[in-house]
Image (tube, rainbow, N blue to C red):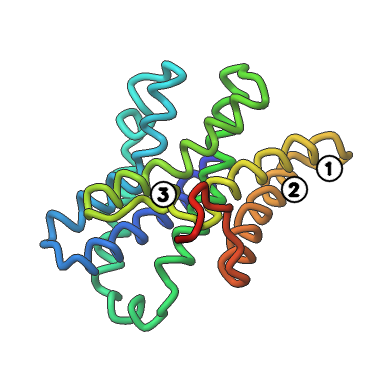
Amino acid sequence: MFYFLMDLLGTVAFAISGVLVAMDKRLDLFGVFIIAFVTAIGGGTLRDLLIGNTPVAWMLESTYIVTIIGTVILAIVFREKLRYLRKSLFLFDTLGIGLYTMVGIEKGLNANLLPVMCIILGTITASFGGVIRDILCNEIPVIFRKEIYATACVLGGLSYFLLRKLPLGDEYVYLASILIVIGIRLVAVKYKIALPSVYKAQ
């Protein structure tokens, strides 16, 4: 139940980030829903396909669809308040990658994958909904920019496997790893920490 709740919270966070991007692009109601939908389930769908977990999770559990629809409606109703929070897109996106990284890792563990594969799976789960969102909205996906994004997922995943060696409860390790992903992303953006470019300045 705990992990399912984390999954739903991640779905809500990414659905809101999708709504905010879609409204920025002035899409119609259908467009807003589609962008919110693919942002929320895109990474998880790819994850499930990679590990052969089909039909994918959102097709088996209607709670995901209901959650996305409800989130879209609430985000539209309270859009002015969300816009007032100037950094709301960044905050919801960051919360989403923290939650979804750990959901993906948990799925990898359940599939008996090696830790490194679990971390890759967690990063895919967290990042690829945003990739699809940005491509559909004609933006360069954030993971291909210099910002620390997928790297935060990888470091959070590594932290998870290190923290598991300590005498801590699973839920505490899980929550701590989520906070590490979120913390790394927040610090990187606040202090403008970025990965080095492969191109020399002209």
- Is residue 1 at all visible to an observer of this figure? no
Q: What residue do we see at 68% from left, 50% from top?
A: 175
- Residue in the picture at 37% in, 49% down: 130
Q: Is residue 100 above or below residue 23?
A: above
Q: Residue furthest right?
A: 167
Q: Position of residue 42 (x, y in %)?
A: 34, 39
- Real-space CA distance between mark 3 and mark 1, rounded to the nearest whole angstrom: 27 Å
Image quarter where the C terminus lies is: bottom left
Res. 143 mark: none
Type of amino acid at the residue the image marks with label 1: Leu
Q: How many marks?
A: 3
Q: Earlier in the sequence, mark 3 or mark 1?
A: 3
Say whether residue 99 is left or right of residue 56: right
Q: Residue at x 68, y 44 (%)?
A: 174
Under mark 3, the amino acid is Thr
Q: Which residue is mark 2?
A: 172
Asked whether disc 2 touches disc 3, contact meaning CB atoms under 8 Å apart, the reply is no
Residue 50 is left or right of residue 27, and the answer is right
Q: Residue furthest bottom?
A: 84
Where in the figure is residue 99, as x and y percent of width and height?
A: 54, 49
Q: Residue at x 60, y 33 (%)?
A: 119
In the image, 155 versus 64, the foreground residue is 155
Q: Upstream in the sequence, badge 2 or badge 3?
A: 3
The 10 Å Cα crowd at callout 3, few under 14, some 14 to 19, many 20 or more, is: many
The answer to which of 70 and 167 lies nearer the viewer is 167
Distance CA(mark 1)–CA(mark 2): 6 Å
